[in-house]
């Protein structure tokens, strides 16, 4: 008797679940808005409605920092000698992006990692197209023999390596991961670019979001140092970078490093990191160019 009643109960639960499945909207639960809908094939975890809310930076007003609106910072005289050539960012740092990044960065929601990485990858592709278009306009590099000029492939901009802004050991223990490193690894894996651990943080700076622009710049002074193991990688890249010339000699091109962080506010963190890399490369007489890419631009 008991087995018979148990079987009826199990069958009733099965029918209820099937009915709920049939009546429920198609798709899956959106990571950000919580509705059940068809999810985007390009941006993992979110529905098509949330995709439309992504605040992409599509029109760049400042060619230096990549801001989509008027930029008073880059017009300042003391800001024109930054260590990086240009910065590009995927999205405006609005309330929605603050929530997405905060859910991942401070609350440890791992499901946001593929989504945020997808945004950065698209920004990198746009940056690569932009830099490639600039290369096409530049005079061609000299070749070993004029007859081989027609055989030269069209230039395409790709950095030699990717690195990232490090966090302190205290911050790493608190969060369990470095969000900039995760973004760099995701981008490097998707685009088949080497990731190198170039920097280390010397001091644990307090949260930058509570500081003024001047305080941010002052805080970042002496905050970073070069990683000796990483700089050896730069030396290897430099030895492999020699290009042929018309006279049969060779010269080394500048090593291009792409520096990754999650949010660009004043650029003081990226500038400090880039300056450490440039100073280390200069001491070894290695020409280096720094480009930066961030997830969001405030």
Image (cartoon, rainbow, N blue to C red):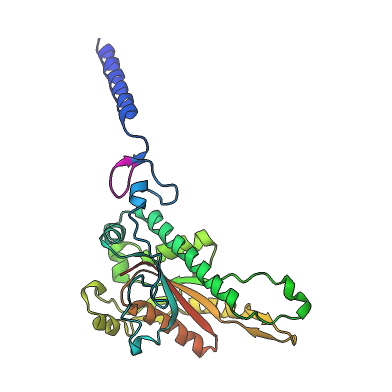
The residue at 53%/88% (across/down) is 284
In the image, residue 284 sits, relative to residue 2, either above or below, namely below
Assess whether residue 85 is covered by the magenta stretch.
no
Q: 297 or 233, which lies in front?
A: 297
The residue at 69%/82% (across/down) is 142
In the image, residue 102 sits, relative to residue 20, either above or below, namely below
The percent coordinates of residue 293 (x first, y second) are 42, 70
The percent coordinates of residue 245 (x first, y second) are 71, 84
Going by the picture, which residue comes out furthest to the top?
A: 1
Please report the bounds of the magenta region as a residue range. Answer: 29-36
Q: How many marks?
A: 0
Is 144 situated left or right of 88 in this image?
right
**Quadrant in the rendering for residue 200:** bottom left
In which quadrant will I find the C terminus? bottom left
- Report if residue 16 is visible in the image: yes
**Quadrant in the rendering for residue 221:** bottom left
In the image, residue 165 sits, relative to residue 278, either above or below, namely above
The residue at 52%/82% (across/down) is 288
**Quadrant in the rendering for residue 36:** top left
Q: 196 or 289, which lies in front?
A: 289
In the image, residue 15 sits, relative to residue 91, either above or below, namely above
The residue at 24%/82% (across/down) is 215
The percent coordinates of residue 60 (x first, y second) are 40, 71
Is 248 situated left or right of 87 in this image?
right
- Report if residue 160 is visible in the image: no
Q: 105 or 147, which lies in front?
A: 147
Per the picture, the main secondary structure of the magenta-coloured stretch is loop
In which quadrant will I find the N terminus? top left
The percent coordinates of residue 130 (x first, y second) are 50, 70
Q: 129 or 179, which lies in front?
A: 129
Is 252 situated left or right of 98 in this image?
right
């Amino acid at each position: 008797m008991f087995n018979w009643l148990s079987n009826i109960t199990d069958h009733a639960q099965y029918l209820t679940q099937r009915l709920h499945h049939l009546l429920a909207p198609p798709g899956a639960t959106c990571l950000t808005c919580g509705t059940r809908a068809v999810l985007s094939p390009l941006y993992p975890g979110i529905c098509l409605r949330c995709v439309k809310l992504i605040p992409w930076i599509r029109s760049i007003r400042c060619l230096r920092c990549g801001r989509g609106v008027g930029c008073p910072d880059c017009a300042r005289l003391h800001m024109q000698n930054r260590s990086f050539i240009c910065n590009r960012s995927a999205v405006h740092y609005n309330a929605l992006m603050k929530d997405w990044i905060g859910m991942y960065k401070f609350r440890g929601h791992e499901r946001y990692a593929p989504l945020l990485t997808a945004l950065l990858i698209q920004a990198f592709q746009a940056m690569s197209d932009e830099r490639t278009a600039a290369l096409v306009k530049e005079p061609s590099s000299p070749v070993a023999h004029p007859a081989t000029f027609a055989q030269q492939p069209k230039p395409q901009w790709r950095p030699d390596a990717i690195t990232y802004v490090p966090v302190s050991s205290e911050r790493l223990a608190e969060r369990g991961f470095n969000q900039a490193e995760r973004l760099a690894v995701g981008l490097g894996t998707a685009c088949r670019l080497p990731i190198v651990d170039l920097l280390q943080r010397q001091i644990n700076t307090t949260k930058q979001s509570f500081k003024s622009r001047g305080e941010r710049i002052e805080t970042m002074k002496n905050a970073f140092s070069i990683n000796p193991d990483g700089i050896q990688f730069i030396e290897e890249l430099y030895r492999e970078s020699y290009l042929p010339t018309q006279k049969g000699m060779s010269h080394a091109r500048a090593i291009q490093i792409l520096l990754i962080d999650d949010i660009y506010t004043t650029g003081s963190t990226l500038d400090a990191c880039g300056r450490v890399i440039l100073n280390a490369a200069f001491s070894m007489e290695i020409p280096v160019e720094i480009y930066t890419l961030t997830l969001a631009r405030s």
